[in-house]
Image (cartoon, rainbow, N blue to C red):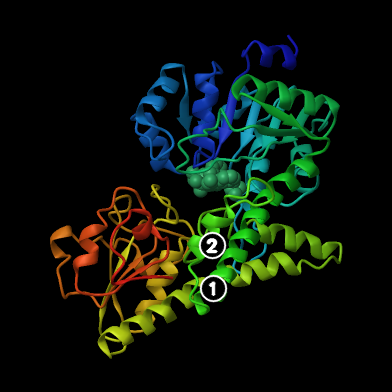
């Protein structure tokens, strides 16, 4: 049977490499769609948790995982099992290195591993976010070391992930999937596979285009968030409430899309992906001023927040910040998730502690700061218990993340100013007497 027919019959084994925020939901979705799935990860902890039926990703419930396991999904660290996979999807990290340049080492290492085990008539798809050209320029040559003809015997494509952690409306299945292959045969197979597991596929002409689509989506967000962050500073100086301005502007039924200011950018994507494109653009000698400027403005936000906090505390107590205690509310990078990656709350914590402040935090999704690529000094710190949140203890309360399951009203009654970077207090209709929106 041809690979195309095997895919149509769901008679092809799917291997998902990298079982994180992207790979695990994909593996579960493929298994629930009827494909036999093997998930691969180098992290033995994750593999063991999955073997116990325990999900470590908010978007995948234990029940969904159980259903996938009942459909035959397994997780392993044994990459020799790639030999039995006819569809291999790569979902490994694509971070920046310390020089803030693309770090494709995970993708390259994975491609080398695949080359050692791959059989002819296999489709390989990259899902990791990256700059245009990666699939053809980086992945294809490494896969060719398998000795098989890439495009003729091994098929290759790119299909970006659009996962939105915490989004309860869209999931892996219902988010339209951009698909592309390095040639006609590959494109057809990529489309055939994804059309079996998601509601809608959107085929674009080249893998470079598919890579550019994803990076454009993320730059669009980064630039627009930077714009509202800048507008916030301007309107703040004019004593105009940016939140009310956005609410008003958003009533325009065309030509405006609301974005909201915040304490800085967070998550695995928006603070990182734009710099994949700026790096690649240098090869073509094209300036990327707009993207860099957005990065600068967004990076500056935590500094602005700490400066405002200093002013507010000073106005309130006549004293500086040094030696005081501040309660940081919400440390995950966005509401209703536990994901801490690139969370601006960590930068706030660092800046405050550098200013001599003792920072305590609460976050119902993050009882303890997990290991992260940066901010090792905060790892294993615990949230303080609700009983320890007492009147008179704090110089200020700083709301960094507006999780739904936080009791905000008692925070207004601690005898100190409350600084709200998310406008949550006003949105809940609570009294704003000692609240500063920043
Ligand atoms: N998190 C998101 O919301 C999101 C959304 C869209 C795109 N992406 C992109 O998807 C890719 C993966 O991101 P993520 O958020 O799932 O990352 P993640 O860190 O949650 O997961 C990556 C997984 O890959 C594993 N891994 C690392 N090296 C490996 C190797 N050599 N072999 C096998 N497994 C390996 C890690 O142990 C980890 O479990 C990135 O390119 C990211 O930019 C992420």
Q: Secondary structure at mark 2?
A: helix
Q: Residue at position x 36%, y 51% from top?
A: 403
| Circle 1 residue | 235
Mark pair 2, 1: CA separation: 9 Å
Nearer to us in this view, 349 or 236 = 236
Q: In the rendering, which numbered label is found on residue 219?
A: none
- Vertical placement of 157 versus 217: above or below? above
Q: Is residue 99 left or right of residue 64?
A: right
x, y percent for residue 264: 50, 65
107, 435: nearer the viewer:
435
354 left or right, relative to 213: left
From this view, report whether residue 58 is shown above or below residue 69: below
Could you say which is closer to the camera, residue 89 or residue 409?
409
Label 2 near ligand 1 (CB < 8 Å): no
In the image, residue 365 lies at what x, y percent?
Answer: 32, 50
Residue, x 32% and y 86% (percent of image)? 315
Displayed quadrant of residue 44 = top left
Picture coordinates of residue 171, whole percent (x, y):
52, 33
């Amino acid at each position: 049977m041809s690979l195309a027919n095997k895919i149509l019959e769901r008679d092809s084994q799917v291997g998902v490499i990298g079982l994180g925020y992207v790979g695990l939901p994909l593996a579960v979705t493929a298994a629930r769609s009827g494909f036999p799935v093997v998930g691969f990860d180098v992290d033995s902890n994750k593999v063991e948790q999955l073997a116990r039926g325990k999900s470590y990703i908010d978007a995948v419930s234990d029940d969904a995982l159980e259903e996938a396991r009942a459909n035959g999904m397994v997780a392993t660290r044994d990459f020799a099992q790639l030999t039995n996979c006819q569809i291999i999807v790569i979902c490994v990290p694509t971070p920046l290195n310390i020089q803030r340049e693309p770090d494709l080492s995970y993708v390259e290492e994975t491609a080398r591993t695949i080359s050692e085990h791959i059989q002819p008539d296999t489709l390989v798809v990259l899902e990791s976010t990256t700059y245009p050209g990666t699939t053809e320029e980086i992945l294809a040559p490494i896969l060719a070391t398998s000795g098989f003809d890439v495009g003729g015997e091994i098929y290759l494509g790119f299909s970006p992930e659009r996962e939105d952690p915490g989004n309860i409306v869209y999931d892996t299945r219902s988010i339209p999937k951009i698909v592309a292959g390095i040639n006609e045969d590959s494109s057809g197979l990529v489309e055939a596979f994804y059309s079996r597991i998601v509601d809608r596929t959107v085929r674009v002409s080249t893998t470079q285009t598919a890579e550019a689509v994803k990076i454009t989506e993320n730059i669009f967000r980064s630039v627009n968030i930077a714009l509202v962050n800048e507008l916030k500073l301007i309107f703040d100086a004019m004593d105009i409430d940016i939140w009310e301005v956005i609410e008003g502007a958003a009533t325009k039924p065309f030509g405006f899309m609301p974005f909201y200011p915040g304490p800085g950018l967070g998550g695995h994507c928006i603070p990182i992906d734009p710099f994949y494109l700026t790096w690649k653009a240098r090869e073509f000698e094209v300036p990327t001023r707009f993207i860099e400027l957005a990065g600068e403005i967004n990076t500056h936000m935590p500094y602005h927040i700490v400066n405002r906090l200093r002013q507010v505390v000073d106005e309130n107590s006549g004293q500086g910040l040094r030696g005081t205690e501040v309660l940081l509310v919400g440390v995950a990078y966005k509401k209703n998730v536990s994901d801490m990656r690139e969370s601006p709350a960590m930068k706030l914590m660092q800046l405050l502690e550098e200013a001599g402040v003792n920072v305590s935090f609460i976050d119902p999704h993050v009882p303890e700061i997990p290991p992260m690529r940066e901010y090792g000094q905060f790892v294993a710190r615990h949230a303080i218990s609700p009983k320890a949140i007492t009147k008179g203890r704090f110089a200020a309360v700083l709301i960094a993340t507006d999780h739904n399951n936080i009791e905000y009203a008692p925070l207004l009654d601690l005898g100190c100013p409350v600084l709200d970077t998310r406008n949550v207090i006003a949105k809940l209709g609570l009294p704003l007497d000692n609240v500063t929106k920043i």
